[in-house]
Amino acid sequence: MNKDWSPAARVQGLGTSVFTEMTELARRTGAVNLGQGVPELPSPPGLLKDVSAAVLAGSNQYPPAVGFPALREAVAAHQARRYGLEYDPQGEVLVTTGATEALASALLALCDPGDEVLAFDPCYDAYPAGARFAGAKVVGVPLAEHGDTFVLDADALRSAVTPRTRVLLLNSPHNPTGKVFTAEELGVIAALCREHGLTVVTDEVYEHLVYDGAQHATIAALEGMRERTLTISSAGKTFNVTGWKVGWVCGPAELVRAVGAAKQFLTYASGTPYQEALARMLDGVEEWAAELRRTLQHHRDLLSRGLASAGLRPYRAEAGYFLQADIRAWGYSDGVRFCRELPTRAGVVAIPTAAFNLRPDAPSYLVRFSFCKREDSVISAVEKLVNAA
């Protein structure tokens, strides 16, 4: 075996994540934790009741490896209803142990040692880890700062493609920036993928959490993209049940089978009572999600105004759980140092965006704050930041 792809090389550098470090800091200092995206908001009461009923009724053994049939049917109906995309629940929908397993399984299925995966930088830290397990490498395509938001750098994207590029990993709505890729940007990405024969793996776990009246659009619905796209989503963010770890993959049967072949040797299957309850809940997601969006948008606005009052310039969060802030006004250029000192200085925990950076020359002065918390938690954090400014 080439020593570059030995087991030790594949996990080198994965180490303890910054999330673990910052969560421990919050615990030790009693700081308000705006670091991890762990919601403090309630889940749908009917969903919780259905899970309890499923457990008591005995739905506690392995589900089918591809997922509970009713959930696969509900996911297919959801994609048709929202995006006009028809998927056969028998072969084009796969239930996974959260979106993270879906992403890892997709990369294991699609990549060989030495392959390259494009991802927009900064990116969720599970992406490079999943690629490393497959012996592949994630290549960061920088998102450009434009005023108080982030935009596609089309030239950087084109220049990142090489003969080794196999997959483009798209995340929209985007973590950690809160960006939603525009229709024009998705068109540019789609055209490049068609030109170079790339497979798209699109992470859409925040699809229902887009703010200010905007709508999520999926790249799979664009011309010539359904047949080359694996669309990944999950229940965790939509229903505030991140601990349930129920996700799914939709795509052409050949690609979904490949993902399933990898997935069966990771968890095989999980979450039978959760899957059963979610199959019923997904049909009514729109009403629930509309109320959740209103709550999260209000919390986003509270946090954004508070950060500005504290002198930490916020960027616009168009979707999701998080917003970015520029910390330089507090005399910092290093987000890691800022986040390590913030619990003591202000009683608040955040995450340095450097934890998501793929490129060594990426900006180091950005920090990610979470607003998927109770209103009183957001208000308390804002007061502490303003007082510490």
Image (tube, rainbow, N blue to C red):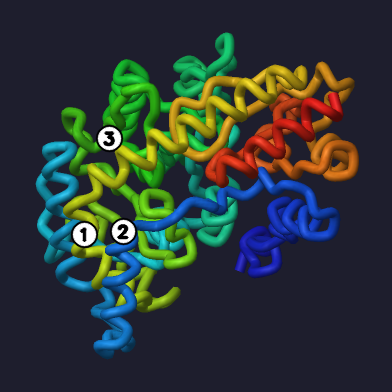
- Residues at circles 2 and 1 in contact by the CB criterion of under 8 Å: yes
Please, what secondary structure does the residue beneath circle 3 have? Answer: loop
Residue receiving disc 3: 218
Please, what secondary structure does the residue beneath circle 1 have? Answer: strand
Q: Nearer the viewer, residue 83 or 345?
A: 345
Looking at the picture, how far across and down is residue 279, in whole percent? 21, 64
Give left or right: position of 32 versus 289: right
Quadrant in the picture for the C terminus: top right
Mark 1 and mark 3 lie on one chain; the one further toward the N terminus is 1
Looking at the image, which residue is at 76% across and 28% down?
364
Mark 3 and mark 2 lie on one chain; the one further toward the N terminus is 3
Quadrant in the picture for the N terminus: bottom right
The amino acid beneath tag 2 is Trp
Give left or right: position of 318 versus 309: left
Above or below for 384 versus 260: above
Mark 2 and mark 1 lie on one chain; the one further toward the N terminus is 1
Residue receiving disc 2: 248
The amino acid beneath tag 1 is Val
For residue 99, say whether it is visible: no
Looking at the image, which residue is at 53% across and 49% down?
127
Numbered label tally: 3
